[in-house]
Image: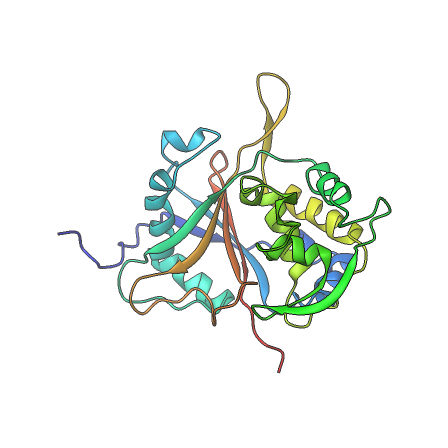
Amino acid sequence: MASTAPVEDKKAFHPIDVPFPPFFDKELREAWLKWGLSEDMGAVKFSFDNALPTAAATTQISKDVLRPFVEDFFSDPTVRSALRGAFPMVFGSGRTVCEFDVMRTSKTRMSFLSEPLVNGGIVSESGHIKGRLEEDYEGIPIVNMLRECLLMEESEHWEVFSEQDRCEFLLMIFQHLVVGGAMNQYDDSATPYYDTTRRLYKEFCSVRRNEDGDIQVISKVVRVRSFSDEGSSLFPREHPSNFCYLIIDPLSRQLWVWYYGYRPWF
């Protein structure tokens, strides 16, 4: 029977004491505050000693290939200590069991976001977001057609992005910015969301040119949904705006943890 004890501290993972540049950019700091993300969003960097499995070097990677790495990471005592100091995560006494998805990184151009939104009548050519009557959706105010398109599966605009599109990390960054936090003062223009999405994607993801000379993202992105082992919790409370990502660079053997845990403002 497999042991449920935490993995031994083999120093496989090491925190790197370095700030994430976009969080300290003057203009972006104003955006984080406006969008209600300044208090509860953060990023922590780590290095790791052991290479990812050979299969992880492929463009598409399965959950089965990444699961040992992801669960070793969250079970590592050094990692747990660093994450508890940065985020409201709770770890049990045993090995961490994660529910997660592997995100796609095949899209790198902002036209992937802007063209469907303009063609679908969600955003104008100038960037103005089409408004609508406000409606609550799982605790998130749907105040415009962009939020409706991104969040409400029953919307007639849901198909602006395909199911495969919705697995792209680029789209998820954009969505998290649009949704924001509890004190979000949303923008009427999509332009600030496009610009900040581009900046975050560039900072998080490592790229190289493939044999055809095209830009290829080499980072592997995992969206961690929850911890399912006894005594552990990833977020302080359930909310659709929560997110936690591992953005893994297999060549430099470094990764970012990008996290937001929703807290009500009242």
- Name the residue rendered at 42%, 51% in the picture: 100
**195 with respect to 155 (left or right):** right
- Name the residue rendered at 62%, 83% in the picture: 266
Do we see residue 169 in this rendering?
yes
Q: Position of residue 155 (x, y in %)?
A: 63, 54
Q: Nearer the viewer, residue 217 or 237?
A: 237
Q: Nearer the viewer, residue 22 or 195?
A: 195
Measured along the vertical axis of the image, is residue 206 above or below residue 128?
above
**121 with respect to 44 (left or right):** right
**110 with respect to 208 (left or right):** right
Most extreme residue toward the left is 1
Quarter of the view holding residue 170:
top right
Q: Nearer the viewer, residue 251 or 103?
A: 103
Most extreme residue toward the right is 126
Q: Position of residue 208 (x, y in %)?
A: 59, 28
Q: Position of residue 258 (x, y in %)?
A: 54, 55
Q: Nearer the viewer, residue 11 or 191?
A: 191
Do we see residue 20 in this rendering?
no
- Name the residue rendered at 61%, 16% in the picture: 212
Quarter of the view holding residue 202:
top right
**201 with respect to 195 (left or right):** left
Q: Position of residue 225 (x, y in %)?
A: 44, 57
